[in-house]
Amino acid sequence: MSISSIFTIFILLTIVSCLQKSILITRHGARSPKVYTEIDSTYYWTSQPEDLTEIGLQQHINLGQSKNGISITDMNGNCIYENLEIQASTTQRVIMSTIGFLKGLCPNNYQEIIKRYFNEYYAQYSTNIEAWNQIMNSDFQNPLELELHYFERPNDFMFHGHKKTVCPAIKDLKKKIESSEYFKSKEEEFKNRPEFDEVFDIIKAAYPSKIFKKKSITLSDIEDIFDDYQSNHVQGFLFPNPSQKAIDYMQEVVKFLRYYEDNCDSLEHYAQLTEPFKWIISQLYSTTPLSWYSGHDTNQVAILSAISDFQPIIPFASQLEIIVKNEIVMVFYNRQQIQTKFCSDGYFCTREQTVNYLMQFIHPNLNSLCGLELII
């Protein structure tokens, strides 16, 4: 085969690949628990709560490697910065995951890509000059040594619209939901199940110096101990060690809280989805091959609750991917295609149908909706 023929094939493959676009939405990798139990503090964890672990970093390096390809690199295998569009949360666990992903995605020139991204995106959110200088002087060989806690994005509706500090109106809504007859009946139903006894015993064992009564345990307490199990299990720690029935039970509780309590009202949808959906819509029409939203499980739950009836527990380093091929939009969760509500078929919808569907979750004035104008 002649050199000209090889070059022609290369150009054709490039054109074909450009017809497909990926909008990737990821959760950070494995982290320490959100709330440390006495067992955690005594035997397992010395880092801050919710910090990314070495396992979590490797998960995102692997994830980045799986996305490396011709559409974002030049002929020498170097990532082209302009072929990437990235939005990332400012928490330590997400920043560290973002570094890991870019290391895996761009093995030849990740240092250049990471530093440029920090300068163009994270610089505006940095709150500590010493920590910033440490990052800028790093070669990112050992990112776990970096101090990444000093970043803050104000009014962060892109990643934290579910928080009361971002949308104060959420506080009264939560009280209303939790005091409703439906919520109370579900809570009672969960606490009357036999699996609750095992979970209660685990909570007591996690805090040996405290005394608990069953009636004082809330669904949020069950969610916290499940988070503890998830985080410790990934690290190979032996506690908590619930039975499979107890795990399934806790997952049911978590799904109820995440998909119902956190996503049952239009206020919650608007607060959590207005900014992400604006960005997704912009990327549906962008020519950038890879658009990446590096966030949290709450972001994936909010998106899934709006676009699909599929309601999974979100594992660490999970990926929700919107593929645009010509004018057709498909959605995949951890590489398995899922049915959406974008159109009647749900699997192969047009770009226009997708945008029309997403638009209903965008509010024109989040400050007014969330009561921020009254605070100002």
Image (tube, rainbow, N blue to C red):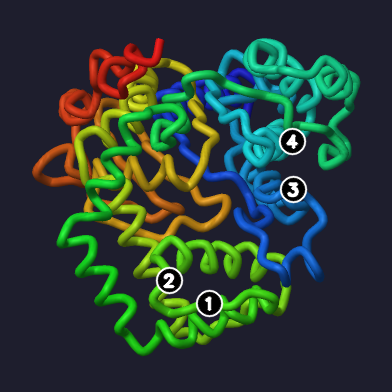
* Residue 212: image tag: 1
**Residue 354 at x, y percent in the picture:** 21, 30
Name the foreground residue: 356 vs 172: 172
36 in relation to 222, above or below: above
**Spatial separation of the CA atoms under disc 2 and disc 1:** 7 Å
Q: Which residue is mark 2?
A: 216
233 in relation to 344, above or below: below
**Spatial separation of the CA atoms under disc 1 and disc 4:** 46 Å
**Residue 267 at x, y percent in the picture:** 24, 33
Name the foreground residue: 209 vs 156: 209
Q: In terms of sequence position, does the residue under pointer 2 or pointer 3 come before the other? A: 3
Q: Which residue is mark 3?
A: 48
Q: In terms of sequence position, does the residue under pointer 3 or pointer 4 come before the other? A: 3
**Spatial separation of the CA atoms under disc 4 and disc 2:** 46 Å
Q: Which quadrant of the figure has residue 346?
A: top left
* Residue 103: image tag: 4
CB contact under 8 Å: marks 2 and 3: no
User: In the figure, is residue 298 to the left or right of 145?
Assistant: left
Amino acid type, mark 4:
Lys
Amino acid type, mark 1:
Phe
**Residue 224 at x, y percent in the picture:** 52, 62
Label 1 residue SS: loop
CB contact under 8 Å: marks 2 and 1: yes
User: In the figure, is residue 326 to the left or right of 298?
Assistant: left
Q: Residues within 10 Å of mark 2 (few under 14, many from 20)?
A: few
Does the image show residue 281? no
